[in-house]
Structure formats: C-alpha cells, structure tokens
Image: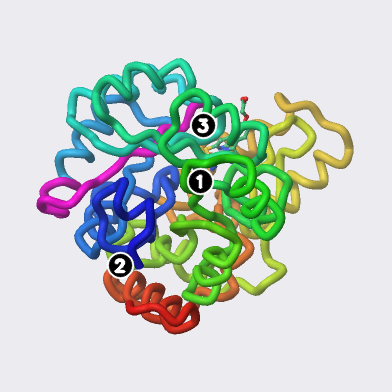
C-alpha cells in the first residue's frame, strides 16, 4: 500500500491517527507509529512544555519511526507549540480549526512536512499555494470541530482541486471505509474514533464504553449557532445545550456547560455532563484492540477489497 503519503512521511501503512484533544497523548501516538502508521500528539489547548514532554515520551515508544504533532490553531498556546515542534525535531505537523499560513515558512525551513486539516476545497487550494505537503480532507462525519460537507462529497472535490496528496477523514473506521476513500482518490486515511478505544488510549473506561455502545444515530452537533460546530455523542449535556441553543441563548450563556467538559469526560469519566467527542462511525466500533491490531485490520481488509498486496 505504497502511496505518495507513505513515501512523504516515511511510514509503512497509509493510516494516520487523528490529533484528538485530551485523547492523543504519547501512549496512543507512540503505539500507532510503532505499529507502522503515523501517530500524532494532539496539542489541543495544552501549553508548549506539555507537548514537549509528550513528544519525547512518544519518540521513546515509537523508536526510529516518525511521530507527528497536531496543532489546534484556536489554542492560546499555538504560537508556543509551533516553536516547540521545531525545537524537538518533529518531522510532520497537522493543523486543525484554522489557517496555519503564518507558521508555514518557519516549519518548511525546519524540514517539517505540513499537512493542514481542511473542510473545504477553498482552504485546500489556499494551503497548497502556501506550501502544504498534503491535506487532510475532513468530512462532517468526524468527531469534534467539523465543517459541513460529507467525506463522500468533499474528498473527490479536494482531490480534483489540488495536486498534493489528499488524506481522507470522517466516517472511516475499517478497511471498507479505507478502500472507499482510496476509490475517491485519497492516498491515506486519518482515523479518530476507532483509536479512541485502543488499548493504548488512556481515555477513561466510561468513555470507551460509551463509544462502543454507540449506535449510528447517537451523535449530535452542538455549537452551530456560534460558528464552532462540535460533534459528540448524545447525553444529558447535549440535550440541555441544544435546548438552550434553540432558545437563542448567547455563547456566554452556553459556555458554562462546555467549559472543561472534554476533560470531564476523558479524564474523570463523566459521560453524562462531559463532552464525549466521537464521529458518526462510532456505531461500527465494537471492541478495544491494540493499535497494531487496528492497523493490521485496516490494511489487510482494504488491500483485499482493492486487490492489492497488503
Ligand atoms: O480541528 C478539528 N477538530 C477538532 S479541534 C477540537 S478542539 C475545539 N473544541 C471546541 C471548539 C473548537 C475546537 C476538537 N476537534 N478538525 C479539523 C478541522 N478544521 N475541522 C474543521 C476545520 C476548519 C474549520 C474552519 C479549518 C479551517 C477553518 O477555517 C479556516 C480559516 O480560514 O480560518
């Protein structure tokens, strides 16, 4: 399964782990990279020094294989983290929730491969012109902060609009989804939800159980009214939030429900009032497995469907 993405990143399999806030730590990222995919530390809202420590721990797990960092551009620490990745010799950076153009020159000068996550053709084209090495085209099926176009519609349109390789994300949790993404022109997949329940994932057992119990129709999108739509699994918090949102409450009046809520779910296991971010494909995720088992399942099944050598 050699593609331009495996060549660009120096990885064995075209499977990239999503840079999930509070979830994608050194344990998960190190294990994904060790298993031949690309593991990413999710910097989210964390300070630079936390990211530095996690990079070092992940490298110790992954050995000589590459580990990347995902930078969430809405973070107040984004400038600091952008420098930490250079100082720590990181070779791959993905970005989310914004336009990373202002960091591009610094990263390119440091030999970093830059892969912005985009939810539209317009941003994909802008990123190619700014020097991106690839893009992740992320459909609205994804968990967390999302755009509005589906993976099925977004991926081929981005593929036709740019010459750099495209990585598909959103709604992909097994080899069938991976094979479908390749048929749309993608050269790798980014996977989030299935890695949330990996053995090496440190999320609270309640969070894993909630993902494993999820059905196809169990996700909701909150925050649409103030321009930051976030997909998560339905619970008491989303019910209260959506009711208030429907009543036209302001961002300030809603904020108390979501402040620190991802941490409450991931770390404390409060899956009733916490934010349980997961994609629409959660219903397909049925068991806890090691990252190696997950990646091997993806590639053997996709290769069979695509009639390739695994
Ligand atoms: O970033 C993600 N997923 C995320 S970030 C996150 S933390 C967060 N929590 C609450 C509110 C906001 C963030 C949880 N999940 N995926 C990549 C992604 N990027 N999806 C959509 C976008 C995106 C959206 C708008 C990228 C750029 C953009 O506008 C570009 C511009 O020009 O500003």
Which label was assigned to residue 128?
3
Q: Disc 2 or disc 3, which is closer to the eye?
A: 3
Residue 193 place in picture, x, y as percent = 49, 61
Q: How far apart are marks 3 and 1 (CA)?
A: 12 Å
Q: Earlier in the sequence, mark 2 or mark 1?
A: 1
> Is 76 above or below relative to 23?
above
Specify whether 42 is left or right of 278.
left
Q: Which region shows up in magenta?
A: 58-73
Taking 11 as reference, is 188 left or right? Answer: right
| Marks 3 and 1 close (CB-CB < 8 Å) | no
Give whichever of 121, 298 is nearer the camera. Answer: 121
Q: Is residue 93 visible?
A: yes
The question of residue 63 being in magenta is answered with yes
Residue 284 is left or right of residue 165, and the answer is right
Mark 3 or mark 1: whose residue is earlier in sequence: 3
Which numbered marker is on residue 136? 1
Mark 1 residue's CB less than 8 Å from ligand 1: yes
> Which quarter shows the C terminus?
bottom left
Measured as percent of width and height from the top left, residue 97 is found at 56, 33
Q: Quadrant of residue 234?
A: bottom right
Disc number lying in front (3 or 1): 3
Residue 36 within the segment the image draws in magenta: no
Q: From the viewer's side, name the closer residue of 207 and 225.
A: 225
Q: Is mark 1 on a helix, strand or loop?
A: strand
Question: Residue at 57% of width from left, 67% of height from top?
Answer: 183
Q: Distance between the residues labelled 2 and 3?
A: 31 Å
Q: Find residue 77 and report its horizontal and vertical position in percent.
A: 39, 21
């Amino acid at each position: 399964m050699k593609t331009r993405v495996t060549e660009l990143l120096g990885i064995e399999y075209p499977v990239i782990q999503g840079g999930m806030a509070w979830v994608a730590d050194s344990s998960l990222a190190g294990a994904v990279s060790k298993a031949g995919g690309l593991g990413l530390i999710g910097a989210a809202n964390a300070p630079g020094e936390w990211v530095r420590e996690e990079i070092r721990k992940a490298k110790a797990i992954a050995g000589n294989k590459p580990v990347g960092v995902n930078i969430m551009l809405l973070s107040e620490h984004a400038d600091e983290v952008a420098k930490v990745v250079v100082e720590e010799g990181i070779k791959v950076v993905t970005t989310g929730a914004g336009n990373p153009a202002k960091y591009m020159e610094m990263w390119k000068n440091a030999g970093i491969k830059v892969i912005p996550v985009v939810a539209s053709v317009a941003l994909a084209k802008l990123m190619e012109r700014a020097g991106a090495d690839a893009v992740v085209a992320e459909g609205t099926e994804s968990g967390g902060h999302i755009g509005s176009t589906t993976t099925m519609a977004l991926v081929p349109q981005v593929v036709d609009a740019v010459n750099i390789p495209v990585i598909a994300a959103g709604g992909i949790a097994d080899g069938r989804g991976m094979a479908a993404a390749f048929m749309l022109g993608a050269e790798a997949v980014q996977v989030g939800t299935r890695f949330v329940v990996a053995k090496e994932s440190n999320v609270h057992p309640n969070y894993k159980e909630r993902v494993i119990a999820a059905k196809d129709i169990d996700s909701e999108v909150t925050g649409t009214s103030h321009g930051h739509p976030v997909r998560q699994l339905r619970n008491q918090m989303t019910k209260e939030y959506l009711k208030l949102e429907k009543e036209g409450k302001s961002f300030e009046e809603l904020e108390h429900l979501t402040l620190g809520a991802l941490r409450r779910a991931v770390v404390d296991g409060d899956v009733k009032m916490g934010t349980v971010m997961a994609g629409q494909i959660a219903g397909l995720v049925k068991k806890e497995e090691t990252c190696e088992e997950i990646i091997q399942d993806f590639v053997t099944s996709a290769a069979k469907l695509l009639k390739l050598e695994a």
